[in-house]
Image (spheres, rainbow, N blue to C red):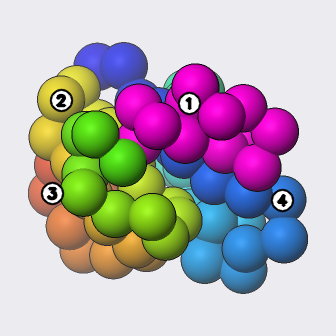
C-alpha cells in the first residue's frame, strides 16, 4: 500500500501522524504542502480540505490524525 502524508513542518498533528507511522515501521511519503503548490492543490482535490494532515492510504483519504482509523486502514 502506498501511503502519502500531506503535511507541513510546523503542524503538531502532522508530526504525530508521521511518528505513528515510524513507530509502526510503516513506509510513507511525506509531502510538504507548504513548499509544493502542486501537491497542495492535489491534496485539496483529493480531500476537499485545506488543513493538514491529509493521509492518502492506498486511495483511502483520512483527514487529521485518527490513530484508530489509521490502524484499521493499514491493517495494524
Q: Is residue 14 above or below residue 31?
A: below
Q: Judge depth for marks 1 and 2 and give the one in front.
A: 1
> Residues under labels 3 and 4: Cα distance?
26 Å
Height in image: 38 above or below 69? above
Spatial separation of the CA atoms under disc 4 and disc 2: 23 Å
Query: Mark 4 highlights which residue?
Result: 9
Tally of numbered discs: 4
Q: Which mark is residue 72?
A: 3
What is the x, y in percent for residue 53?
51, 62
Q: Which residues are magenta?
A: 30-43
Secondary structure found at label 1: helix
- Mark nearer the N terminus (1 vs 2): 1
| Disc with the residue nearer the chain's start (1 vs 4) | 4
- Please say whether residue 9 is visible from this viewpoint: yes
Q: Which residue is mark 2?
A: 59
Q: Earlier in the sequence, mark 3 or mark 4?
A: 4
**Earlier along the polypeptide chain: callout 2 or callout 3?**
2
Residue for badge 1: 39
Magenta highlight on residue 37: yes
The front one of 56 and 18 is 56
Task: State the residue at coordinates (28%, 40%).
Answer: 45
Amino acid at each position: 500500500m502506498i501511503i502519502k502524508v500531506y503535511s507541513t513542518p510546523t503542524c503538531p498533528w502532522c508530526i504525530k501522524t508521521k511518528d505513528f507511522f515510524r513507530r509502526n515501521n510503516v513506509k510513507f511519503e511525506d509531502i510538504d504542502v507548504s513548499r509544493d503548490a502542486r501537491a497542495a492543490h492535489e491534496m485539496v482535490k483529493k480531500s476537499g480540505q485545506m488543513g493538514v494532515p491529509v493521509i492518502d492510504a492506498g486511495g483511502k483519504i483520512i483527514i487529521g490524525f485518527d490513530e484508530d482509523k489509521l490502524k484499521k486502514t493499514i491493517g495494524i
